[in-house]
Amino acid sequence: MNYKSSSRTAMKRILCIWLPNWPIQRLVVDQPELNGTAIVLYAHDPRKGQRVIFCSQQARRLGIQVGMPFAEATAISQHGPDNHSPRGARRSNKTSSCEMIFSEHAPATDHHALQQLAEWCEQFSPVVGLDAPKSASGLLLDITGIGSLFQGEEQLAQLVVDRFSDRGYWAHVAVAGTIGAAWALAHYGIRFDSRRGKPAEPRVISNTETSTALASLPIESLRLSASSIELLHRLGIDQIEQLETLPREGLVARLGDEITLRLDQATGQATEIINAHHIHPEFHSEWILEHPTSDQEVILQIAEHVCHHLANLLQAEDQGAVQVRCWMETTSQPIKMDIGLFRPTSEAAHLLQLLRMQLERCRLPGPLSRMCLQAIHTARITRKQQRLWDQPGRDPRQLADLVDRLSSRLGPTSVLAARMRAGTLPEDAYALIPLTGPQKSKARLNSAAGKRKPLGPGQRPLQLLHPPQPLQALSVSHGPPIQFSHAGRDHRVVQHWGPERIETAWWHGHCIRRDYYRVECQTGCRFWLFRRLDNQHWFLHGRF
């Protein structure tokens, strides 16, 4: 954020979204199977060594605390919390090891995921930014004049909470006249009981209520540095209302400029600007209508114009669009459409064809007043040397055009490609990546996956079930299954191959150990079964 002083500032309307315990939330959304699991994230401190920096609520119940040495946390997972949990922590009745997932904190991944959420939030406001340049855990939206498009700011704030909840996140949302006030209310002005299992209700205040709403909040809500917070606590100043009673001249002389600046930003006496996540794109084309229209033919003519103009800009720089964003402002509410491409293109006809498909599926809520086409992600177009006499064959551009059309018609998440990952468990050994857009260029074959020993034919099933399906099986003690029941049918095993031991590494937390068998039944069908070694339960994981 950029700052500048101002004696009189026109108050805007700011919506702040805070995602508590953001790294844990991001990890659980990326891997839903971790929901309800004790998760511990650690990082290396140059002075104190490896320390716990984030942990889930389940891990806290077992005695894990932020700042705890990593060795102490692993001891709790191996021997139980009874002898290691701090005084006052809830103790487990179990004396055996506790199932925990340990992972090194990945701040770059968290930051990238938050940037993706910022792009997604542009459906609510064209100006979206992260709430901090480093270690961000929330978003800031400028909703000045936008609330009326959503039947009021309260409805907009609730819509944001609901949309985040639909994606698996629980968010604190507050609306105020300044960035500082909205941030303070989102972090310290909303009470949330996670045991209720419902998102917290948003907090919306008017510009005239700013001072009253901030008065009872702790000084931590002013986004002060740790040293300033410690100094104020030593002086007996714990709340903002106590800080406001102090003389301004003496406050600056004794405590420095930071405290007064943050207080002025929260109350609106100093201007603070959101650093928008998306800077103005280099390649963009727009058309502004003097008189808004709902005529479909006119809208298509405008689309053709902006596509040709954007294509000319791309061709002049020898660039091709990988992802294109279309903004359409109407008299009711704005609409955003993203178009991903399989390979970079600067062909106006191809861009127009994909945009037409999107427009056919979209019903405008009101007359169109502005259309803007932006090349969000671009790449240099590669040229292939032409032969004097080309051999007849498949043109790779035809495949790319087909993928683009399918993705535009069905959605980018419907046209996917499998990529190998370095997961030990079969269900973690691959990921499905969209074939269009910038995501595909970021998906690389994992080096560990590429070093796997090749398997012979028939050693892995053609169909992998995710998640594995539990079975009722009769087996020899620590041996192969004799018969099993699945989907209401009994299967008798006449031949088997195995066992093949697959287990996870210890540094991933609780070790998962499985014995896999390839079995052939009396009907001739072949299945891939495994037994969990911790509880001796059987599962069906694949079919041949």
Image: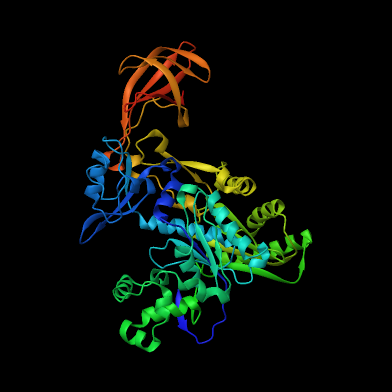
Location of residue 232 in the rendering, given as x and y in whole percent from the top left corner: 32, 75
For residue 211, above or below residue 488: below
At 31% from the left and 42% from the top, the residue drawn is 508
Q: Is residue 542 above or below residue 2?
A: above
Q: Nearer the viewer, residue 214 or 143?
A: 214
Q: Is residue 458 visible?
A: no
Which residue is at 40% across, 72% downward? 239
Q: Residue at x 46, y 68 (%)?
A: 184
Residue 309 in picture, x, y percent from top left: 64, 67
Depth check, front residue: 284 or 57: 57
Q: Position of residue 371 (x, y in %)?
A: 67, 65
> In the displayed image of the protein, which residue is found farthest to the bottom?
249
| Residue 72 % position (x, y) | 22, 48
- Quarter of the N terminus within the rendering: bottom left
- In the image, residue 178 sits, relative to residue 453, either above or below, namely below
| Residue closest to the eye, 382 or 509 | 509
Please state if 283 lies on the left or on the right of 360 as rendered. left
Do we see residue 259 in this rendering?
A: yes
